[in-house]
């Protein structure tokens, strides 16, 4: 019976044409983002071809083999950017970044200690990256920065934002649709009664994830078709051609473990699933709390604004410990997407903080939803369009 | 009826939400243009020197005034000499004049990297040069170094324009773009009036237009939050059949449209007064009479209005866009069965408007406006605002007229 209820709730959600239109618009928007920035695609194809032929690990052998390849339009450019490349992680000391942050942002006390501890533990990851020669990965050569940024900074962030918006709206709709159709009295007085909210929660979570999966897979598929990265999908994320600028420090991509492009993309999209679920739960909680779809949305919006406000307040006033604590909230999860699985920045203080934050909020929101559900079970039914 | 509709729109809860979001938005996107304008001591000096020039010489710097302005440089240098002689660190190095300080600073700068190890002589000289530099741009010295650099910069820029005049466009900055159209347009006012003699620092147009761009984003967002739910609520609560079957009939849509437009007008005005007023506290009012095209490398404008008039035109664009968006939202609300459907329509509209707003108003009516750079149609900013208004008007007309032929279905 429960499966049947979830099925009916799914049908209700799928019957809203605007959800389908929004998904189509999202895919259209992402396609525009991808297609409007195709500068250097010839060069990328050449790098992919070279990687296929002689491998993607720079060094003396690579230099020799690259020189032996037949002349091509971008051969000299590639030689110029790769010849004599050395491992930048060999003598890399992460504590230097912590020192810079401490002096530049005047970070003291516990905040400085936490930061120092994080960068100390990052050193072992950097040593491992040095051992595997991760920085010598050719990646996309001179176009690495541009391609990685368009994939992770722009596309993945947009996909996740779209997934989050859809999740919140689907949760609000599912939560409030009985009020909308004036069926709440009938539904809540049935044998299943108010526990129908559990089916609604499950159904809206499923549709949110399906919507996110549809937008993500289509958009990444279009990206793959347009750029044709081929063997570059196996290239390293910590290539010396890719740098990230975090709080005024431009560094290589210092991840906790070594990632290939495909592996990192999969990890980002998977963690994105949890983030979408978190936002779905926030939406559902807002809907249950207000009993009105629009007010629920405004409450959610205010929550986001409040989070931004806190970040700005603590950052501007130099309250760095509070600033670091405020990063354990859902919105900064999305904001810091381009640094996921790295130890960079002043905002994170433990390894894989984004994963722990996501887990923490799943628990918090689970408890909140449970409390709201219990409140809902005792509440009088009011019949009005929500 | 209009009053009743306005009461429905101006719900106190929604207003509270708008106020809270407005405060956060201001903090995130707008406050920087006020708190950090001019940005840094050197920009502050450029701003102050330009403001002094406007006070003394008026909105243009004519040749005889320029000679007088050039002469002020030597008195500034003498003032700097006095400050240098009073500085103990400068005395330590035997520096007695501003000229000697510049030479010292130049030599001290010749290190590859600053390590902070002041036991090394070169490192110590570098650090001390920085300390003297900080002293010379501090309040203690009335930012004398910044003012000297600003005066030198303006003299250099004035000389470039005086020597090259309109030819600077033919042989210089525009030659690579091949944009003859701009050179022709510029000839219309530049050739006759020697418009380059106008005084207007670059940072003013940049900051003002960027601020207005973000302000327009907020105006659109706040308008969406305020007006979007009203008609949806009527429809969800089955008030529409009641309204349509009343003596006023379907004409109620006209009243609702008028109420929405009036609300947009009011909200846009409130936003403009509050946030525009806050922006004006940064002192840009001094330049209201100055014209947009200036030897201070303000950029190549398509028109040569006064800065004040330009600000007014930007405000008019804000109104046009907000009215246009209001019309679109009115149409979408009429065709939304519930809040979620409405939000799913409004969110993409807002994203498009936000992208458009910042690109449309940043350096509006200047050659380096982003939309102009993409489309190459002069004055595209005003046209884009007109197009948004036209779309809004057309959709509103459809939303008002079509129901007259429609069956009333509950």
Image (tube, coloured by chain):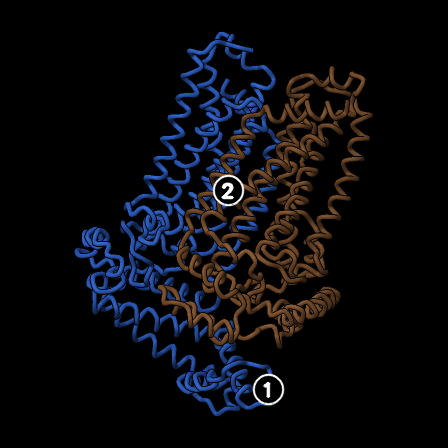
Q: What element carries label 1?
A: loop
Q: Mark 1 points at which residue?
A: B118
Chain letter belonging to callout 2: B
Q: How crowded is mark 1: few (under 14 residues within 10 Å), some or many (20 or more)?
A: some
Shown in brown, the chain is A
Q: Find residue B218 and name its label.
A: 2
Give the position of the C terminus of chain B as an image quadrant.
top right
Q: What element carries label 2?
A: helix
Is B255 above or below relative to B73?
above
Viewer-nearest residue: A94 or B318? A94
User: Which residue is found at the position 53% from the left and 81% from the top?
Assistant: B113
Which quarter of the picture shows residue A70? bottom left
Viewer-nearest residue: A281 or B190? A281
Q: Position of residue A333 (x, y in %)?
A: 65, 50
Viewer-nearest residue: B102 or A73? A73
Q: Position of residue B303 (x, y in %)?
A: 27, 49
Chain B shown in which color?
blue
User: Which residue is found at the position 73% from the left and 23% from the top?
Assistant: A5
User: Which residue is found at the position 32% from the left and 46% from the top?
Assistant: B375
Is A65 above or below relative to A266?
below
């Amino acid at each position: 019976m429960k499966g049947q209820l979830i099925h009916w709730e799914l049908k209700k959600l799928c019957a809203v044409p605007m959800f389908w239109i929004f998904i189509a618009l999202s895919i259209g928007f992402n396609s525009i983002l991808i297609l409007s920035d195709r500068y250097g695609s010839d060069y990328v194809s050449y790098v992919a071809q070279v990687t296929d032929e002689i491998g993607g690990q720079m060094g003396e052998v690579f230099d020799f083999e690259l020189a032996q390849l037949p002349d091509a339009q971008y051969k000299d450019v590639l030689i110029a950017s790769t010849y004599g490349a050395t491992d930048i992680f060999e003598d890399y000391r992460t504590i230097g970044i912590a020192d810079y942050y401490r002096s530049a942002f005047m970070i003291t006390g516990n905040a400085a200690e936490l930061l120092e501890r994080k960068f100390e533990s990052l050193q072992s990851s950097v040593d491992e990256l040095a051992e595997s020669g991760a920085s010598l990965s050719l990646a996309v050569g001179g176009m690495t920065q541009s391609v990685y940024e368009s994939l992770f900074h722009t596309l993945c962030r947009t996909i996740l934002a779209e997934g989050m918006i859809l999740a919140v709206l689907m949760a609000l709709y599912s939560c409030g649709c009985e009020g909308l159709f004036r069926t709440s009295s009938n539904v809540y007085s049935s044998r299943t009664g108010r526990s129908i909210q559990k089916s609604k929660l499950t159904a809206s979570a499923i549709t949110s994830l399906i919507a996110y999966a549809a937008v993500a897979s289509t958009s990444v598929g279009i990206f793959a078709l347009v750029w044709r990265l081929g063997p570059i999908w196996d290239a390293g994320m910590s290539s010396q051609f890719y740098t990230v600028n975090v709080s005024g420090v431009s560094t290589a991509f210092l991840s906790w473990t070594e990632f290939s492009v495909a592996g990192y993309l999969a990890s980002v999209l998977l963690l994105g699933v949890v983030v979408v679920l978190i936002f779905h739960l926030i939406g559902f909680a807002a809907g249950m709390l207000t009993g009105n779809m629009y007010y629920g949305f405004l409450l959610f919006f205010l929550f986001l604004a409040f989070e931004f406000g806190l970040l700005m307040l603590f950052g501007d006033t130099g309250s760095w410990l509070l600033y670091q604590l405020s990063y354990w909230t859902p919105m900064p999860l999305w904001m810091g997407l381009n640094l996921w699985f790295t130890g960079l920045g002043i905002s994170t203080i433990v390894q894989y903080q984004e994963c722990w934050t996501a887990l923490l909020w799943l628990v918090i929101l689970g408890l909140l939803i449970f409390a709201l559900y219990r409140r809902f079970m005792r509440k009088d039914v009011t019949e009005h369009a929500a | 009826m209009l009053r009743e509709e306005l009461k429905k729109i101006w719900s106190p809860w929604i207003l509270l939400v708008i106020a809270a979001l407005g405060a956060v938005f201001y903090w995130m996107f707008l406050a920087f243009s006020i708190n950090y304008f001019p940005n840094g001591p050197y920009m502050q000096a450029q701003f102050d020197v330009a403001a002094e020039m406007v006070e003394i010489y008026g909105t243009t710097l004519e040749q005889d005034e320029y000679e007088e302005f050039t002469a002020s440089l030597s008195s500034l240098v003498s003032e700097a000499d006095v400050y240098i002689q009073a500085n103990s660190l400068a005395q330590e190095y035997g520096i007695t004049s501003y000229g000697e300080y510049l030479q010292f600073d130049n030599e001290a700068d010749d290190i590859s990297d600053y390590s902070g190890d002041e036991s090394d002589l070169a490192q110590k000289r570098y650090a001390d040069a920085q300390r003297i530099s900080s002293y010379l741009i501090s309040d203690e010295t009335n930012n004398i170094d910044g003012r000297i650099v600003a005066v030198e910069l303006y003299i250099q820029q004035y000389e470039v324009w005086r020597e090259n005049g309109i030819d600077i466009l033919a042989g210089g900055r525009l030659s690579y773009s091949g944009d003859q159209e701009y050179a022709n347009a510029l000839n219309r006012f530049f050739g006759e009036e020697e418009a380059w003699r106008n005084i207007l620092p670059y940072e003013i147009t940049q900051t003002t237009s960027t601020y207005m761009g973000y302000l327009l984003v907020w105006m659109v967002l706040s308008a969406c939050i305020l007006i979007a739910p009203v008609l949806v609520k009527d429809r969800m609560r089955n008030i529409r059949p009641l309204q349509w079957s009343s003596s006023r009939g379907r004409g109620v849509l006209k009243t609702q449209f008028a109420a929405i437009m009036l609300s947009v007008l009011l909200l846009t005005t409130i936003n403009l007064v509050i946030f525009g007023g806050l922006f004006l506290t940064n002192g840009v009012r001094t330049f209201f009479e100055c014209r947009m095209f200036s030897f201070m490398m303000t950029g190549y404008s398509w028109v040569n209005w006064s800065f004040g008039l330009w600000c007014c035109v930007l405000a008019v664009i804000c109104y046009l866009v907000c009215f246009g968006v209001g019309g679109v939202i009115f149409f979408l609300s009429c065709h939304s069965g519930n809040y979620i459907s409405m939000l799913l329509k409004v969110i993409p509209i807002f994203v498009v408007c936000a992208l458009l707003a910042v690109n449309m108003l940043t350096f509006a009516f200047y050659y380096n406006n982003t939309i102009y750079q993409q489309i190459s149609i002069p004055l595209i900013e005003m046209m884009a605002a007109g197009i948004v208004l036209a779309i809004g008007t057309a959709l509103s007309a459809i939303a008002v007229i079509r129901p007259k032929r429609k069956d009333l279905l509950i």
